[in-house]
Amino acid sequence: MSSRLKIGEVVLGERPRLVAAGGDAEVEALLHADGADLVELRADLFDDPQPAAIAAALARLRAGARPLILTVRHAREGGRPMPDDRRYAVYAAGLAHAHAIDIEIASAEALAPLVQRARDDGRLVILSAHFQDDTPSLGTLLGLVARAETLGAHVTKLVTTAASPADLRRLLEATLAAAPRPVATFAMGPLGVVSRVLFGVAGSLLTYGSVGRPTAPGQLPVGELRTWIDRFYPA
């Protein structure tokens, strides 16, 4: 199933796809993110995330010829605070320019019209969960995968924080057990760095790198991550 999923013209499932992530300070760097397969615009990281400004940034990034993921991360999962009506408006304004959207599983019901519109328009829908302090139980993680699928996800993204090797093992077990449902998984923090490179072996479809300020703890620069991906997943 995952081998047939695409973001723009980038096929998912053949090897982990490298996503260059950033906000308004990184737009130019994202435009020239050599080594990246995809670009994620974090609209919540804009100093003034007005819908028109986000749409303009996405339109600018389309010149880079890399498919775009639009994310407006909720504050409870690591984003900057933003009124709910503004979040909805930003997603709605950006959808025409993006090839995929990333919405939290916890927000998917409230944003259900956007999820449906994205699917109807042929955009890939990533529904995600982010744990800033720990890695939940295996049952909780797999329950989130099932929940995301019922809410319209093409891909479920699970991002946890690894405080111990046991946390990494649990997230790896969830990645393996989720098959054949498409997932992207990795852990934040120093211990989580290895997951950003090696969880593709277990089926994780995406990994994220920085082009300036990291958007998450433990995130590697795109160039460094590209080197590791090419080493472990030769084309």
Image (cartoon, rainbow, N blue to C red):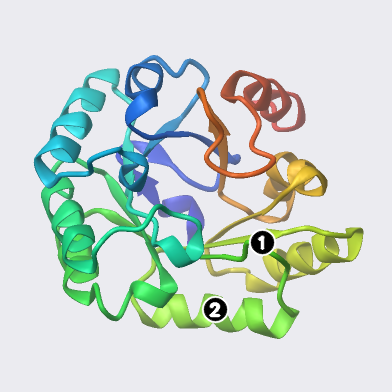
Which residue is nearer to you in this view: 156 or 140? 140
Image point (22%, 19%), residue name: 63
- Circle 2 crowding by C-alpha within 10 Å: few under 14, some 14–19, many from 20: many
Q: Position of residue 157 (x, y in %)?
A: 52, 60
Residue lying furthest right in this view?
A: 165
SS label for mark 2:
helix
Which residue is nearer to you in this view: 47 or 185? 47
Q: Position of residue 51 (x, y in %)?
A: 13, 46
The quadrant of the picture occupied by the C terminus is top right
Image point (24%, 72%), residue name: 111
Q: Quadrant of residue 126?
A: bottom left
Circle 1 is placed at which residue position? Answer: 160
Image point (52%, 19%), residue name: 35
Q: Position of residue 38 (x, y in %)?
A: 42, 33
Distance of label 1 from label 2 (alpha carbons): 12 Å
Q: Quadrant of residue 87?
A: bottom left
SS label for mark 1:
strand
Residue 27 seen in this snapshot: yes
Image point (88%, 60%), residue name: 164
Q: From the viewer's perspective, is 62 left or right of 185?
A: left
Earlier in the chain: of badge 1 and badge 2, it is 2
Which residue is nearer to you in this view: 85 or 196? 85
Circle 2 is placed at which residue position? Answer: 144
Amino acid type, residue under disc 1 in the picture: Thr
Q: Position of residue 148 (x, y in %)?
A: 44, 76
For marks 1 and 2, give the one nearer the viewer.
1
- Circle 1 crowding by C-alpha within 10 Å: few under 14, some 14–19, many from 20: many
75 up-or-down from 45: above or below = below
Cβ atoms under marks 1 and 2 closer than 8 Å: no
Q: From the viewer's perspective, is 17 left or right of 61?
A: right
Amino acid type, residue under disc 2 in the picture: Leu
